[in-house]
Image (spheres, rainbow, N blue to C red):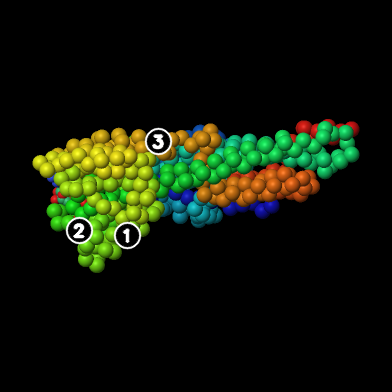
Amino acid sequence: MPAADTIVALSTPAGESAIALIRLSGPDCADLGQAISGRSQPLRKRFAHFAKYLDIKGDLLDECLITYFTEGQSFTGESMLEVAPHGNPLIVQKILADLMARGCRAAEPGEFTRTAFLNGRMDLSQAEAVSDLIRARSDRSLQVAQRQLHGSVGRKMSELTERLLSVMAHLEAYIDFPEEDLPGEDQAGPASELRQLISEMQDLIETQRYSALLHEGIKTLIIGEPNVGKSSLINALTGADRSIVSDIPGTTRDYISAFMMVGPWRIEILDTAGLHEAGDAIEKIGIEHTIEQAETADFFLLVLDAATPSPTLPSSLLSRMTPINTIIIENKTDLPAAQSHADFLPDLRHVPMSLLQRKGLAELRDAWLQSIDASLSQPQNDGVVVNARHAASLGKAVDALELASSKLKDGELSELIAADLRDAVEHIGQVVGRVDNERMLDSLFKQFCIGK
Ligand SMILES: Nc1nc2c(ncn2[C@@H]2O[C@H](COP(=O)(O)OP(=O)(O)OP(=O)(O)O)[C@@H](O)[C@H]2O)c(=O)[nH]1
Ligand SMILES: [Mg+2]
């Protein structure tokens, strides 16, 4: 096989910083390390060398730390170099240009992690976790990414595969040794194990919703009639003058979104146009947008003016609101005419508030956190959370298992059932980016005495 390229990339953000990190991976790293540091000896592995960076003409570019990793003992599995110069974009640019002049190639996005995956340093779900980890913006998503990086998804897939292989082994024994003196084909065992596997995999697929919420944020809609204080609320929650506040009803014409945190959860919060029957053409469009947004919202903060009668809400909105996903905010409790609206949608949680006096915000955050925790508490499945790609593969595996299960019930041939099970194993294998036939054989041989 021809030697692969040696790739190079700046691994820290472009711009001024105390230090920058330039990473290289590929067969030339050992020679390059020696050449750029002007050493006569090869660099010691896994040792931070304080060295002068000398360019291809021998000119000094900077003083930096250079660390060399040998093949098999690095992130990518190839030999690697990490060069840490001062974080001056000009120095970084000169070093990158010099490394290119010495034959390196600029790395593609994600190429270091891809190489790590191709070299078997991690499975596909772990490679994905690297990018999730970098992008995580809340404690919860960080936690899930870290677990996945440590192989949580891979381990779960291995467990499912083992169990499927065991069902298969049971069935395949009859294909391979029909005349052998094997125990009678007890279909209740494999059939109930299959049902169990299907239900566990469906639970796993469900966790995709959780992972989407973690990454995109819990979409929360502030809704209510005009002038009740919706824009005041988004501003108070985000600590910024994000939305215009005025005493003119109908000030907010279209939705405005911002990101914020509630405890460990990332929230995308949207201020919307006030809901009411009348209104000009632009307001009407704004209200339509609110109703559209409500269809995909995860959470609602329904704001009321405590001094005015309870609102009449469009039924399309009301039907989306449940005690788990909605909090009613009775705002303007400071007004003399303010009254309790506890009897309005009494099943939903009510929080009294005066945004004018900045009262009730802490209570709202507490109630909100409790609601989110209640609806999104740690998913089952040992905390394993799958992403959309995993869920798609698992969905195909479930389809194959459903087929196998109904064939088993109809007493069809073991060969046909085993083919569906094999499909399922392959789809599960796709989650971690590999299908390991060796393991299937191991499992088969372990359970049945083949040697005679
Ligand atoms: N007294 C009192 N006034 C408030 C309170 N919260 C907001 N307001 C006032 O109510 C008016 C409307 O506030 P906004 O936040 O613009 O209300 P909105 O719901 O966004 O209104 P639209 O965008 O028109 O739908 C402003 O004059 C605010 O200063 C409060 O707790 N008490
Ligand atoms: Mg507004």
| Disc 2 Cβ-to-ligand 1 distance below 8 Å | yes
Residue identified by numbered label 2: 250
Q: Amino acid at mark 1?
A: His
The residue located at (53%, 33%) in the rendering is: 382
Q: Residue furthest front?
A: 343
The first of marks 2 and 3 along the sequence is 2
Circle 3 crowding by C-alpha within 10 Å: few under 14, some 14–19, many from 20: few
Q: Quick one: label 1 or label 3, which is nearer the N terminus? A: 1
Secondary structure of the residue carrying tag 1 is helix
Amino acid of disc 3: Ala
Q: Which residue is mark 3?
A: 374
Residue 332, percent from left and from top: 16, 43
Q: In whole angstroms, how far apart are the C-alphas of marks 2 and 1?
A: 14 Å
Dots 2 and 1: beta carbons under 8 Å?
A: no
The residue drawn where x is 24% and y is 39% is 342
> What whole-number distance in Å separates the C-alpha atoms at marks 2 and 3?
34 Å
Number of numbered callouts drawn: 3
Residue indicated by mark 1: 289
Residue 451 screen position, x and y as percent: 87, 33
Q: Point out the tag, 2 or 1, that comes first from the N-terminus.
A: 2
Residue 392: x, y in percent? Answer: 57, 50
Residue 160 percent location from the top left of the image: 63, 38
Residues 387 and 148: in front is 387
Q: Quadrant of the C terminus?
A: top right
